[in-house]
Every structure is written in C-alpha cells, then in structure tokens.
Image (cartoon, rainbow, N blue to C red):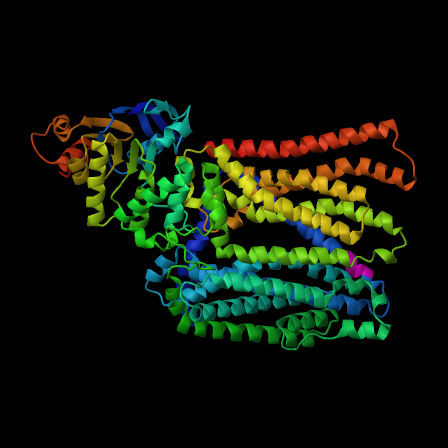
Amino acid sequence: MTLFGITMNELIDLLRPRFLSFKNVGDSRSSGNRRIRYLLFAAIGLAFWVGAFLMFYRVLTYFQGIEEFGDVLARKLLSMVLLTFFSLLVFSGIVASLSKLYLSRDLLLVHSLPVSGGKIFLARWLESTIDSSWMVILFSLPVFLSYGIVYKAGPFFYMTAGMALIPLCLIASAISALVVVIAAVLLPAGRIRTVFVFFGLLLIVALIAAFRLMRPERLVNPETFATLLLYLREMGTPGSPFLPTTWASDSLNAALSGLKGEALFHLSLAWSCAAALAIVATWVAGAFYFKGYTKAQTTAEKLFPHKNGLRGTRYPFFEKISGPAWAFTVKEFRTFFRDQTQWPQLFLIAALIAIYLYNFSVLPLGQSKIRTIYLQNIFSFLNMGLAAFVLTAIAARFVYPAVSFEGDAFWIVRAAPISLKTFLWVKFAVYGLPLLILAEILTVSSNILLQVTPFMMALSVVTVFLMTPGVVALGVGLGAAYPDFQSENPAQAVTSFGGLLFMLLAAGFIAAVVVLEAGPVYQVFMADFHGRSLSGLQWIWLIVSFALVLLLCILAVLLPMRLGERRLRG
Amino acid sequence: MIELTDLTKQYGSTLAVDHLDLRVAKGEIFGFIGPNGAGKTTTIRMMAGVLGPTEGTVRIDGIAMEANPEAAKRIIGFIPDRPFLYEKLTGMEFMRFVADLYGFGDGLFRQKAERFLIQFSLYDWADHLIEAYSHGMKQRLIIASALLHEPRVIIVDEPMVGLDPAGIRMVKDLFRELACKGTTIFMSTHTLEIAEDLCDRIGVIHRGRLVALGTTGDLRGTALLQEGDLEEVFLRLTGKETP
C-alpha cells in the first residue's frame, strides 16, 4: 500500500525511532515513579476535562433557557470554539513543522539515509500533525460531549464530531507545513528561525483582532444591541463558506438537527480539502523541502545583527561590571533573547495580557443588582489570585525550564568557581525581577480599571509582591530538582513530572495565600462598609493571618531553592 | 599539586573508579590512558569538581575539592572531551563570561583574550555566535578560555579530539611551555603517541583501578616487555592483545 508515493513499510521505518523512543522512555523509568507520573497527568487532565465540560454544559443549558435565540447563541459559540481550535492548530502546526522539518537534531542522520526528501517530509509531517493536534482534540471532546448531552444527540453526532475534527487537524497541519516549506525557500539562508518571530507577531495581532471582533461578552449581553432583530442577525450570520471551520460547524449543526445528508455533505467538503492540501503539500515538499533544508543548515543569524568589534562596547553597562554572578546574569539575558524560538511565546504572553486587561474593562459591573463597590472589591481580591495564576503559567514556560536550558553546557556551571547556590539565585533574580514587574503591572492596571478602594490596591500590590518570589523560587528550585539537560526542547519540560509538581505546588501556594487573606480582608471590608472599627479578636485574626502569609511566602522561596541546590549537587 | 586519595565512584551497581590513589607533581605532564569505559572521564570529572565522588578525596594544590570547591576550581583549567558551549554567545562574549567567572579586570582581559584568540586562530571569528563554529573551533575556544585565568592545574579530557594537525602541534607546544613554567597538566587520551611524546609519567586505568604507573620505560617493565611502543604496553596491560 502506498500513500503519496511512499510505501507503508517506508513510512513505518521512518516513524519507528519515534515509537521506540516513546516506548523506551516508559521502560527506562522505575515503575513506581512512572505510575505516580501517569496518575498526576491523568488527574490534572481529568480536572481540566471535567471543568471544561461543566462550563460548556452550564453555558449551553443557560442558552437553551433563552427562548427564540438560544440555539443561535449555541451555534455561534460552537463556531467561535472551532475557530479558536483551528487558530491554535495552525499556530502549533507551524512551530511543530518548523522543528520537525528543519531544526531537529536527528535530521542529519535521517537525510543521510537512502530516502527521498519528499518521503522524509511526509513522515515528519504526520509526526508534527499528531504532535500539534492531540491535545486540541483531547480537550475539544468535553465541548462536543456537552453539546451532545444538552441537545440529546444520537451516535451520529459524535461520529460527525470525530470525522470533522480529523480533517480540521489535517488541514491546519498541511497549511502550516506549506507555509514553513515555502518560507524556508524564500527566506535568506540563516533566517529560518526568524519564522518563529514573524509568526509570533502575526499571532499576537490575530489574537487581539479576533478577540476584539468577536467581543464574546456580547453573547450574554443583548442590551448592547439596538434591537433584538439586529442582535439575532448579528449572531446568526454564517461564517465564510471557504473556511474549514465553517464546514466543521455546519456539519455539526446539521448532525445536531438530525440532518444526516447535510452533515455528510459538509464533512465531505472538509475531507476533500484535507486530501487536496495533503497532496499539494507533498508535491510542494517534493520540489522544495530539501532545498529549504539545505539553506537552513547555514549558520543562524542574529535577529538584530550588529557590528560588535573586539573592542566594541555594545552593552557598556554590562561591560563595566565583573564578577561570577554578573557573568551568569549577562549570559542568561543574551542566550535568552538570542533564542528566536522564545519570541512567539513572549508575543503570546503579551496578547494574553492585553486580553486579560480588556476583560476587566468590559466587566458589566454597572448592570449588576449587587452594589458595584462590593463587586469591584471582590473582583480585585480574586484578581490577586488570578494574576498569580497567570504568573504561574508564565513561570512554567520560562522559569521552570531555566536550569534545563543550560543543556549540555551545564558542565561549565559545574566546573566554574561558583557555587550552585549562587547559580540558582542568579536564575531567581534574572527571572524574578521581570515577573515581579509584570505581576504588579497586571494587578495595578486591573485594579485601576476596577476603580477599587486604596486599601484593596495596597493589599493587592503587597500580596503580589510577596507571592511572586515564591512562585519564581518554586519554578527555579523544582526545575533544578528535576532537570532535563538532554532535552531538545527544554520548554516542554513543564509537561514532565517536575513541571506538573511545580504547577500543583504553585497553585496550592497561591490558593493558601488567598484563603488566609480572605477572612480578615472580608472583616476589614465589612467594618469599613458599616463604618465601625475592628474588634480585638478581629485584629488578632488579621495579624495572625498576615503573619502566616508572610511565613508561607518566605518558606516558598527558601525551601524549593534549597531542594533544587541539593538535588542538583547530588 | 594533584592528590587523589582512595577516590571511588559508584554508579548504581557499577564501580566506575575503584579506590584510586595518585599524586601528580607541580610542572608535571601526566597522561591517563585506558580502554573505553575504564573510568578515565569519571576520574577527570571528579578532579574538576564536576562530579562528586562516592568515597575518597581530591586535593588540588592542597585544597580539598569537597570542602572548598570554589577555591579549588579557581586554580584549575578544565577542558572536557566534548565541546558543549553556550551556542548563543559569541566567542568573545564567552571569553568575557569566563573572565568574569574567574574575576579579572577589563584591561587585562582584553589583552589576554586577544592574544589567545590569535594563538588559537579564532580572532576573525570572535564576534560570530558559537553555534556557527565547527567542532574543532569550539574545542579551540574551550582550550583558550580554560587558559585565560592562568590556571596552576590543567585537567584535560582528550585534548586533541577535533583539532587539525596544526592545532595539535600548537597545543602540544603550549602544554610543554606551560609545564616548563610550573603548570601541572593532567590529560587523558586515547592517542598513545601523544601520551608517549608529551607526558612525563603515564597512568594506566583499567576497570576503575590503576594497573600501572610510571614512565614509558617503567610501564614496559610492568608489562614484562623488553621492547615495544606504548601501544603494545597498553594492550598487554589491559589484556586486549590480539593473539
């Protein structure tokens, strides 16, 4: 059997190292450790899965209660969800194909084998399709399940959902691979990594634009439309007939309504497009992939090249200061910002922060029956925790892998006349300071948007100031306790056992701080609200709670750093 | 200058280095040879403070590595067998990084860095990212940066791997010159000609134990050979002789 000119045996041969490595990773760990790891993964995955299901179920049930246009809203939501999935698939497809096709370490070996570039492309493309899609597919299932249950759909709907998702993934992955293969030929030699920066920028613009255009807050706020008719028309507008997400949502909507023929028609559109794109991608790759790969083997150029002669002082501030700790600080900045694969992540964070703050600006506080001042301060209090969770997500991507990023060059740290303790504290400082500034900006700006009381503003600023070092130290410490110096992509370390442990501990730490502060803050707020002062007992409660918060924050810094140092030395 | 006492390293059930005792004097070039997996790299890494021993001690110029690793490392120049570096730094930036680690001033650094970069034929590449360097160039950069702080002890694992003939000649001459000035050089190598040509004494390690120690002549005696080069001695001592 052949697929686009490649026999099944050839394809299996090319993919075998991946299967075997995956299998051997499982075999190489002790069974006890592996079981704990899998359980942890399963528990977190299940929690997300159940959370997503409950959220969608609740929203869809609410929509169903709205007469006349409940279904319209549900369909609009489905098309938005599919569009979001598709954007994610394209973006992760670009990142995955770029690494699989041009940057992987094993490519040198693979290209030395008696196999054509086109065949290598096909094997790698399938690999990157699976890599970039499995998580989106997994987490889209609760969405479809909730639709199926709320609309009491039969097996045909679930089958349609599966059959609609696969071509969506294939189309996204084929588009990504085509874009990458063409970019590799067109871009000047040594500029292949700039694709990361370019698509990162594109992503931030697309995300903000999409969010701004969709304005999801309108889904629950019909009052903002002049008339009901206008609202209905706006919500019921079908998507572009040329968008793969439209075919997917049309087939799903038809399946929900029991229109099997229509569902199959839209499915066939999606499948034929996926097949056509796969053929086009294979053909384009056959012609251009090896050419682009050869170009990509040239030395990578700096994103912003500069003439830095031997006597040049490009960074006069850096050049003037000496000392081992400073040497590592400078090295950390330089290696981080010169790694162009980091840039899309930075842009993504910028986009998410913009959306985060935008959400606060559109909160319908004035329309609530509850007193606005009460809501504002509740939101502000919860926002402390939310900002810390955002911080945890960023730390998981950048701080946790910071030690693993040393990679094979870690021997330099071990051989240097610097203690591991200093090395880890340098990491803490380098990542801690920008994250502290970021967390404070998030907190202060969202508080300004919420127009909170000065007490809440001060409390948020101080709490975030205390919590951030704890989260950063947890990242650095656990990253050092569970390092992976062999990884081709240390950024993925967050999905490892240590990474998950970091996220769990950080979430627990943040929750503990928020819970400890919640009681006394409520008392202060209510006392202020009723114009009375705090009782002696309330003062004691307040002091003990804040002392415990302070102690917890100090321990969250010291304990993980010590653990990391000890494990790294061992 | 180098004292290894009862040095042992155990990886799980594998005994990589087995109670090794060794003294290397100031200004001596010591060669460390042995078959693959004999424990050479493990020993060298313990000496450089990159790896902790299971038992025993490493003393460099009287400083115990375990008790005072930073002070001991300050007088060592370590050259590993594989040239892994920070790929996103330029050669010059890496030199500066090393200079900052060992804490010496800017004026002195420039002068020395330029001298070494010229000596190791890297001057024209000083402002290029290390990821653009060939294997040999990376190896040269590691050697140049290890010499930058004028170490009293040089610990080197396979010094000539990746170097071209001119590079090998230059490194050999440089090591001789440094040894004459009192620098102690401890090198492991598979290139027996280099060990024979360069080293004052040679130690043969096999299955984690030091099976022979001395000059080539001494080793010949240990191997019960009247004549023959180091290769024959090595094969006899490690039991790898072809029938």
Looking at the image, can residue A179 be seen?
yes
The picture places residue A287, in percent across and down from the top left corner, at: 40, 74
Q: Is residue A542 magenta?
A: no
Let me know if residue A142 appears in the view.
Answer: no
Q: Residue at x 60, y 73 (%)?
A: A270
User: From the image, which quarter does the C terminus of chain B lie in?
Assistant: top left
Apparent side of residue A555 relative to residue A569 in the rendered image (left or right): right
Query: Farthest residue in the left direction?
Result: B226
Q: Using the image, determine if residue A321 lies above or below residue A197.
A: above
Residue closer to the observer: A70 or A215: A215
The residue that appears at 87% across and 32% down in the rendered structure is A534
Q: Quadrant of the N terminus of chain B?
A: top left
Residue stretch rendered in magenta on the structure:
A57-62
Quarter of image, res A1 = bottom left
Q: Is residue A58 magenta?
A: yes
The dominant secondary structure in magenta is: helix
Can you give x and y, in whole percent of width and height, for residue A486 in the image?
44, 46
Give residue A363's position: percent from left, percent from top.
79, 57
The foreground one among B46 and A205 is A205
